[in-house]
Image (spheres, rainbow, N blue to C red):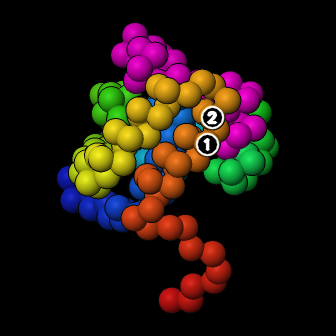
Amino acid sequence: MTDNTLSVVISFETIRSKIYFVRGKKIMLDRDLANLYQVKPIALRQQVKRNLKSFPEDFMFQLNEKEVETMLSQNVIPSKKSLGGSLPMVFTEQGVAMLSSVLKSQRARQVNIMIMRTFVKIREMMSSHKDLQEKIGQLERKYDQQFKVVFEAIKHIIYTEENPKKIGFISE
């Protein structure tokens, strides 16, 4: 297949399962994006480092040790070893959009379109939970940091409620 006829099909659920909530933002891990783009994670990170001015802190940031430990404990990251010995870069929706200017392949463009559509769909799903979000926001403002973990867990449930993770074997 030539670049012009490349057709990439990645399901909404596949992309959605790779979007996480960190520092109050929806993010995607560099290794997950590299996998979707079919490039090596180190190649993706190198391209980003060559174009750092295109990735301000609200587009891309690096997780700290505590955030990695949290993701490990929630089984988001299978092991620290899977990170390749470094703390992962993570990308917000705007950072993912910016990746299309750095990764210039046809696949990268098509995958980015699907990711953008997934972020839009998630926003639409979240807007249906607007009342609940407002109440949680009020409670967060009312109570101090000791309840931060509880609120993060509630947000995680809200954002994943539409399609809970399945456990088991599925044969085709």
Q: CA distance from mark 1 to mark 2?
A: 5 Å
Q: Which type of secondary structure does the marked residue at label 1 adopt?
A: helix
Residue 30 spot, x, y in % from top left: 54, 37
CA neighbours of label 2 inside 10 A, class few (<14), some (14 to 19), many (20+):
few
Compared across the picture, whether 165 is left or right of 60 comes to right
Point 58% across, 47% down: residue: 153
Query: In the rendered structure, which segment of residues is drawn in magenta?
Result: 46-71
Height in image: 111 above or below 70? below
Q: Quadrant of residue 16?
A: bottom left
Q: Residue furthest front?
A: 142
Residue 62 is a magenta residue = yes
**Is 65 on the left or on the right of 20, as rendered?**
right
Judging by the rendered image, the residue that carries numbered circle 2 is 147
Tell me the quarter of the image containing the N terminus: bottom left
Please name the residue that numbered disc 1 is placed on: 150
The x and y percentages for residue 85 are: 77, 33
Amino acid type at mark 1: Val
Which residue is pictured at 67% across the width and 29% down the height? 146
- Residue 164 placement, left or right of 150: left
Residue at point 65%, 80% (across, down): 168
Taking the image as drawn, is residue 43 in sight?
Answer: no
Residue 168 shows in the view: yes
Q: Is residue 93 magenta?
A: no
The front one of 4 and 93 is 93
